[in-house]
Amino acid sequence: MPLHVSQAPPSALNSVLAALGSPTAREAGTPALRSVPGPLTAEVPLPVHVLDVAGPGAGPAGAPRTRLVGWRFLIRGGELSLAAADTVPSAGDWAFSHFFEGPYIASTERALRQAEAAQSVWQPRLLSVPELYMITLWLHADTSAEPAEGALDGADVLIPLAPAPPGIAAHRPHRAADLLPRLAVRLVPPPLLGSTA
């Protein structure tokens, strides 16, 4: 089924297109962008949320909270996704941050194909868990939700991208209600040496 890909804020898309159009885009530290002679396009805008494990309401006592930290676009040359571009909040708007490449590009595309093959309709997002060096494709059940809003619901589906942390299988879809407790155990700080905890 088709995914309900959110529309990125115009300033986020425009900042990426301006960066792609600049002479320095092909000179960036992203060899894949230098290797394609034709035009490059920014496609599949995904809101990037961070799992907030330290803020109020986060952790075992409350529902997990997320916060929007950027928008990511897949950069395509022809039919191939070569890199990604991230934008970040800037003075109430969005600004280009950087281009990058690596395993998360192909992994994101694979997870999106998995989601499209499912029998449900989803709003795709990315959920980052920095403490675990982990990114998942977050399939939000409320397709009408504002991309910057919407709490992580237990019925939402999370697909860990490769490389995933040890013990978490990449590209295996999990209900959020099943995966989040496994992540929470890993996010609890270990007791200090010499403490009685």
Image (cartoon, rainbow, N blue to C red):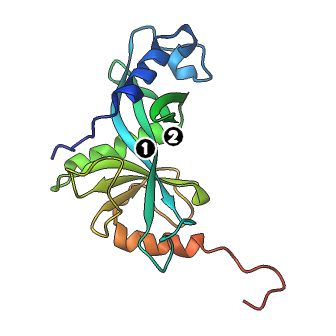
Alpha carbons under labels 1 and 2: distance apart: 6 Å
Which residue is outermost to the bottom? 196
Residue 185: percent from left, percent from top:
55, 76
Badge number at residue 107: 1
In this view of the protein, which residue sits in the foreground, 39 or 106?
39
What residue is shown at x 30% (from left), y 54% (from top)?
139
Q: Tell me if label 1 and label 2 are in contact, CB under 8 Å.
A: yes
Q: Is residue 145 above or below residue 65?
A: above
Sort mark 2 into few (<14), some (14-19) or many (20+) by Cα contacts within 10 Å.
few
- Quarter placement of the C terminus: bottom right
Residue 8: percent from left, percent from top:
33, 34
What residue is shown at x 44% (from left), y 58% (from top)?
66
Q: Which residue is mark 2?
A: 103
What residue is shown at x 32% (from left), y 57% (from top)?
150
Q: Quadrant of residue 71?
A: top left
What residue is shown at x 41% (from left), y 72% (from top)?
63
Q: Is residue 176 above or below residue 11?
A: below
Residue 31: percent from left, percent from top:
57, 21
Q: Quadrant of residue 196?
A: bottom right
Residue 29: percent from left, percent from top:
62, 23
Sort mark 1 into few (<14), some (14-19) or many (20+) by Cα contacts within 10 Å.
many
- Left or right? Give the position of 196 relative to 10: right
In this view of the protein, which residue sits in the foreground, 113 or 85?
85
* Residue type, label 1: Ser
Could you tell me which secondary element the residue under label 1 belongs to?
helix
- Left or right? Give the position of 115 relative to 71: left
